[in-house]
Image: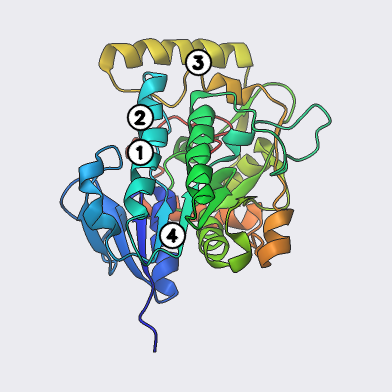
């Protein structure tokens, strides 16, 4: 009998990383997690994993992490920063460092890079979903950094490393703090809506994305390829908010926020961030993600090549998420929530 697959996961303590670790364990894989400091992260408590202390921005810490691994799932990324160069340091140079380390493993069967719809940019003027064949058109620091990281992955593919790139759209689900404050607003009877016209988004439930990363990362047809991984049905934020209100049994008052007002808040947030040294999620750069009318991608290529499809409809996934927040006590004040954008595109 062949020994179980040994998979390294970077970003394992994060929201998506936690779901991926659970998916891998459920498939009988051994899981090694790269963590930035000693101790068991809350998100990984009680899980049968190996912890290795390291940081993708420090190459000397990565050799132990990649030793003997069969698969690498690279999820670690910076979503916000005070300066673009800080984001590039983690998302681009960090990816290159991990690629350099991973190629020393003589057992490596796949390097799976979790990228983002932010690389492709919003829908074109015709409103059709974005395809993998479209030229990247990022509109934020984050999108540009992930585009450059993809280039690094492709370069290693060209010299023989088996790689796969997966681009999720907006990810939501239990344990996510990105949209937590939106659920908290719903719990208080408020429904925050941006602008006057509904905007369309692709979504994916966290456990569905975890399954996509593994299935796309292990299928022989996906080597050297890039795939979107989202639910096939796009929906406006209003539908997401209504599903949350229904799950929590709350009647809500719609609070419509003009884009100009959100831009002012972003400017204020940037000033506070510069003064405190702690970057916020709502920034003037991030406003560039809020203006487009649609962030929608097609995941047909993933279905065609591997049979994978996201199986959790928005109403079901949001319902499970809302009830998880409530039962975990996260719908009260704080709990470390960050301020999300209307389209927290990953």
Label 2 near label 4: C-beta < 8 Å? Answer: no
Question: Residue 336 versus residue 136: which sits nearer the camera?
Answer: 136
Q: Residue 284 carries which label?
A: 3
Label 1 near label 3: C-beta < 8 Å? Answer: no
Where is residue 230 shown, x and y percent of the image?
64, 50
Residue on which the image places disc 1? 94
Q: What element carries label 4?
A: helix
Left or right, 48 with reference to 329: left
Where is residue 241 shown, x and y percent of the image?
61, 40
Residue on which the image places disc 2? 89
Label 2, residues with CA under 10 Å away: few <14, some 14-19, many ≥20: some
Label 1, residues with CA under 10 Å away: few <14, some 14-19, many ≥20: many
Q: Is mark 2 on a helix, strand or loop?
A: helix
- Above or below — where is 314 with respect to 218? above
> Residue visible at 28% across and 11% down?
275
Q: Is residue 255 visible?
A: no
Q: Which of the two marks, 4 or 2, is nearer to us in this view? A: 2
Left or right, 197 with reference to 33: right
Left or right, 282 with reference to 255: left
Q: Outermost residue toward the right?
A: 126
Where is residue 22 shown, x and y percent of the image?
40, 65
> Residue visible at 62% across and 58% down?
316
């Amino acid at each position: 009998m062949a020994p179980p697959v040994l998979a390294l996961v970077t970003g394992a303590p994060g929201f998506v990383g936690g779901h991926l670790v659970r998916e891998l364990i459920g498939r009988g894989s051994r899981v090694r997690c790269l963590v930035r400091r000693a101790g068991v992260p809350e998100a990984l408590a009680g899980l049968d994993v190996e912890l290795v202390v390291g940081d993708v921005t420090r190459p000397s810490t990565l050799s132990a992490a990649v030793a003997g691994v069969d698969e690498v799932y690279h999820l670690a990324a910076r979503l916000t920063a005070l300066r673009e160069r800080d984001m590039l340091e983690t998302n681009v140079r960090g990816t290159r460092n991990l690629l350099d380390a991973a190629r020393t493993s003589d057992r490596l069967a796949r390097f799976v890079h979790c990228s983002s719809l932010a690389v492709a940019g919003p829908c074109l003027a015709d409103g059709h979903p974005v395809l993998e064949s479209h030229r990247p058109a990022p509109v934020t620091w984050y999108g540009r950094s992930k585009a450059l990281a993809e280039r690094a992955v492709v370069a290693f593919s060209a010299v023989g490393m088996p790689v796969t790139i997966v681009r999720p759209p907006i990810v939501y689900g239990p344990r996510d703090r990105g949209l937590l404050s939106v659920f908290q607003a719903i719990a208080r009877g408020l429904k925050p809506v941006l602008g006057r016209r509904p905007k369309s988004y692709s979504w994916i439930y966290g456990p569905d994305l975890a399954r996509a990363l593994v299935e796309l990362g292990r299928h022989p047809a996906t080597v050297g390829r890039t795939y979107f991984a989202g639910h096939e049905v796009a929906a406006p934020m209003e539908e997401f908010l209504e599903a949350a209100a229904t799950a929590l049994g709350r009647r809500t008052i719609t609070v419509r926020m003009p884009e100009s007002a959100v831009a002012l808040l972003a400017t204020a947030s940037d000033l506070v961030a510069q003064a405190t040294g702690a970057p916020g999620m709502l920034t003037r750069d991030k406003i560039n993600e809020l203006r487009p009318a649609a962030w929608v991608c097609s995941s047909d290529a993933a279905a065609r090549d591997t049979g994978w499809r996201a199986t959790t409809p928005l109403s079901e996934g949001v319902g499970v998420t809302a009830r998880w927040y409530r039962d975990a006590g996260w719908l009260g004040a704080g709990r470390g929530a960050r301020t999300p954008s209307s389209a927290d595109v990953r």
